[in-house]
Image (spheres, grey):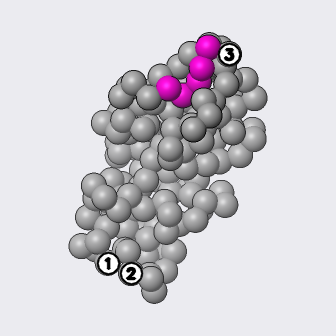
Amino acid sequence: MVVIHHNPDCGTSRNVLQIIKAAGYNPIVIEYLKKAEQNSIVSVICRSKLNTKNSVESEKSPAKKLGLLNENITDEAILEAMLAHPVLVNRPIVCTEKGVKLCRPSEQVLTLLAQWPKGELYKEDGEMILNAQGEQPKN
């Protein structure tokens, strides 16, 4: 089973969902910005080994204004803020039988998949994810 905590407005999240589907999975998609799903994403962060501070979206959110980027901020304060402002959650977070991971960059999701997509695969911006042999291109 593959579960993705997804924001359809996020390009990285859309790319990760594309990779999962191209690999043949029919993932459970949780749009965590919707009211009913807010507790779900925070619960996943709490139960996983994800670093709470790394789970904060710092660029396109009120994280700085709320003081969540301060070094002395507690995990509890961050999680409470995420419940009040789900846009603070960095995404996408993917859960599989192999583990839980914040999949930034998009290619990180491959480490969670038992089966990879076949053939070439590209991100929305045209960057290659997998070559014709189904391998990650060498930099």
Whether residue 17 is visible here, answered yes or no, is no
* Picture residue at 44% right of the left edge, 29% below the top: 127
How many numbered dots are placed on residues in this image? Answer: 3
Q: Are marks 2 and 1 in contact (CB under 8 Å)?
A: yes
Q: Which residues are magenta?
A: 128-132
Can you tell which mark lies on residue 133? 3
- Residue 94 in the image: state x and y as whole percent: 58, 41
Residue 138 vertical position relative to residue 132 in the rendered view, above or below: below
User: Which amino acid, mark 2?
Assistant: Asn
Question: Residue at image x 50%, y 26%?
Answer: 128
For residue 70, the mark is: 2
Observer-nearest of 74 and 117: 117
Q: Kindly check if marks 1 and 3 are in contact, taking CB atoms under 8 A apart as contact.
A: no
Q: Earlier in the sequence, mark 2 or mark 3?
A: 2
Is there CB contact under 8 Å for labels 2 and 3?
A: no
Q: Magenta includes 136?
A: no
The C terminus: image quadrant: top right
Q: Is residue 110 visible?
A: yes
Give the residue at x 31% y 67%. Answer: 63
Measure the alpha-carbon separation of dots 2 and 3: 45 Å
Mark 2 Cα shell of 10 Å, populated few (<14), some (14-19), many (≥20): few
